Amino acid sequence: MSDLFLGLISGTSADGIDAAIARFDDARPRARAELVFGRTYPWDAALRSRLVALGQQDADLSLDALGELETRVAEGFADAANRALADARLVAGDIAAIGSHGQTLRHRPQGCRGDGRHGFTLQLGDPSRIAERTGITTVADFRRRDVAAGGHGAPLLPALHAALLQDAHEQRAVLNLGGIANLTLLPGGGGDVRGFDTGPANGLMDAWCLRHTGAAFDRDGAMAAGGRVDAALLARLRDDPWFALPPPKSSGRDQFHLAWVEAALQGGEAPADVQATLLALSVATITDALRAAQPATTRLIACGGGVHNGALMRALAAALPGTQVESSAAHGLDPDHMEAMGFAWLARRTLLGMPGNLPLVTGAAGPRILGGIYPA
């Protein structure tokens, strides 16, 4: 079997399909990961608009529309995989397997809203079509087995964070700044690894920026930096009961969306002030969660698209005096492709018959081998 795996993911913001080709070494005391190639490929503009719109509200889909969307997303993922191979000057036979996360349409695990109904998580992107189009064995649908075992199906990358970044002599945390923010807590001395979602990261800011400027994201936090935090609005947003829920906890765009923001507005707020407040919300909920769960953290290692938002990173550092806030690049791990690498790693574990979840993180009944295997 080849030692190269290709990870694919489109995150909560649906800002593109991240493709990462990587190899992994399980050497002790610390595993290693090598990013051989990484690139983000854009969605078809109309398809992205459809995905973003579906994430912003409880819109119903006909069965025909859902089936078509499933196929179109899979075609986008297959195209991204094939383009990555060509750009990396590799062929299908060089890759052991694709690990495809898919595009999350809904994420509502049991108890995530305190209502006790049957939980589910739904990612689009037919893996049979990806395997057919690429000629590569595809591992996909990673989250639902954990949910079936009573877990949240998220976050799934703390096990990889621990393998690559835990240090016996330092209290560390890994912060993934995607559409939603999640923390991995890495205590020194070999303590239990924990992790959970903390709330919005880039997702709300991206959506607000798109609506008011036409830009897909707030480059370097310039829009937020041009506004002032509305303390009353921030307090209303932070008052959402979800933030007070104990871990395990997870969330998504279908919970933190623009309608949620608009319900807290009183009218007349300047768009830049709302953007500044949304950035402050991300910072406050992240730092509140970190202080509550691991107050002695000395190093916070950030990855994900939010690493490039200078205003966000500066605000995090200012809110956490005594904690070194830095990009995962300082540890040789590309922040833009950590998540895609994570699903390449999960595909590898599935093929090796190894569990991919951490029950203490997700709340599942036990370790589980995640995903289904769709042979080439």
Image (cartoon, helix red, strand yellow):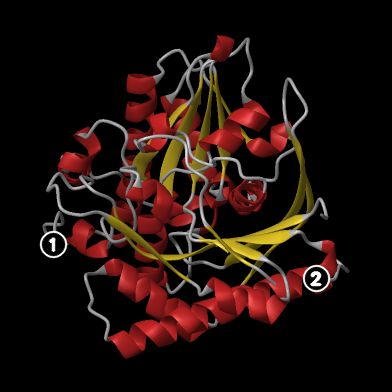
Residue at 50 percent across and 83 percent down: it is 72
Residue type at tag 1: Gly
Distance in Å between CA atoms under marks 1 and 2: 54 Å
Residue lying farthest to the right in this orientation: 89
From the viewer's perspective, tell me whether residue 149 is left or right of residue 261. Answer: right
Q: Nearest to the eye among marks 1 and 2: give it.
A: 2
- Residue 32 position by quadrant: top right
Say above or below: 189 vs 192: above
**Element at label 2:** helix
Determine whether the residue tagged by mark 1 lies in a helix, strand or loop. Answer: loop
Q: What residue does disc 1 label?
A: 267
**In this orientation, does residue 201 appear?**
no
Q: Hey, which quadrant is residue 179 in on the image?
A: bottom left
Q: On the rendered image, what quadrant is the N terminus found in?
A: bottom right
On the picture, is 47 further left or further right than 151? Answer: right
Q: Is residue 195 visible?
A: yes
State the mark number for residue 191: none
Residue 283: x and y in percent read 38, 37
Amino acid type at circle 2 is Ala
Taking 148 as reference, is 3 left or right? Answer: right
Evaluate if marks 1 and 2 touch, with contact meaning CB atoms under 8 Å apart: no
Residue depicted at x 70% and y 45%: 334
Position of 115 relative to 104 (above/below): above
Q: Residues within 10 Å of mark 1 (few under 14, many from 20)?
A: few
Of residue 52 and residue 162, the one placed in the foreground of this image is: 162
Q: Position of residue 136 (x, y in %)?
A: 72, 70
Give how far across and how far down residue 369 sits, in percent. 52, 46
- Rendered position, 217 above or below 300: below
Assign the C terminus to one quadrant of the image.
bottom right
Whichever of callouts 1 and 2 sits on the residue coming sooner in the sequence is 2
- According to the picture, the residue beneath numbered tag 2 turns out to be 92
